[in-house]
Amino acid sequence: MAWRLRPAAIVSRWTFVVFAGVTVGYSVWALYGSGQRLSLVDVQRLPGAAAVELSPAMNPVRIVLHVGYAPAGTTRIHYEAALSGPGGDRMWEARGTIGSRDDEATFIRHAASLGTVTVAEPGVHALSIRFGGGSMDDVREARIELRRNVARVDPRVAWGGGLLAAASLLGALLTPRRGPTFEPALPVAREEAA
């Protein structure tokens, strides 16, 4: 009796790999790879707000924060970013923390998609960011990238792919991995009584 991997186990494992790969690939592409770079603003040397020329033809515009820092302690850097329209009205803002409490490397590069905005009127917009929060981290580089004509992340694709990957993983874990294969019995030679 020989043992081999059952077909159901093989199929469920490969479907998990396919669905997980497609979901992660789509999400990473949509958040960081779609669209064209409009500008890259060095916010570490920025005294106030950066002036950025935007128009509705660039919609949607994604704002991505790129930071390089040396972590110190367990408190991470907090940020507050904002984009104001030509008239001075605030059209977008984001707050958050860079990195995680468990960062133990000597230098970390971190990229975070802060959000997607829709430009209503053309003109010069003001982009600002502040760092704070009582962190001892040493920010060595900080840039904000604006990307134009980006793809919006469709949550149905991300959730659907994630749920299908989870179902496939559950199927792979619950399906018996190996099973016996029975070979046909060899015919027994009988002696005939004479």
Image (cartoon, rainbow, N blue to C red):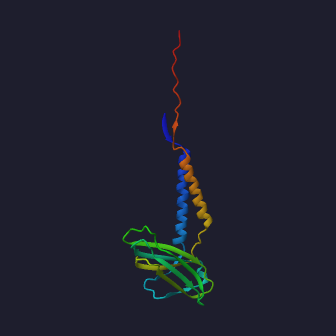
Please tell me how many numbered marks the rendered image carries: 0
Quick check: 72 left or right of 172? left
The residue depicted at 54 percent of the width and 66 percent of the height is 27
The foreground one among 41 and 75 is 75
The residue depicted at 42 percent of the width and 68 percent of the height is 103
Location of residue 91 with respect to 189 vertically, above or below: below
Quick check: 100 left or right of 152? left
Location of residue 135 with respect to 87 vertically, above or below: above
The residue depicted at 45 percent of the width and 86 percent of the height is 46
Residue 38 coordinates in the image, percent (x, y): 52, 81
Location of residue 161 with respect to 146 vertically, above or below: above
Q: Which residue lies furthest to the left in this view?
A: 106
Q: Residue furthest top?
A: 194
The foreground one among 55 and 164 is 164
Residue 55 coordinates in the image, percent (x, y): 59, 84
Residue 41 coordinates in the image, percent (x, y): 47, 83
The foreground one among 54 and 79 is 79
The foreground one among 48 and 27 is 48
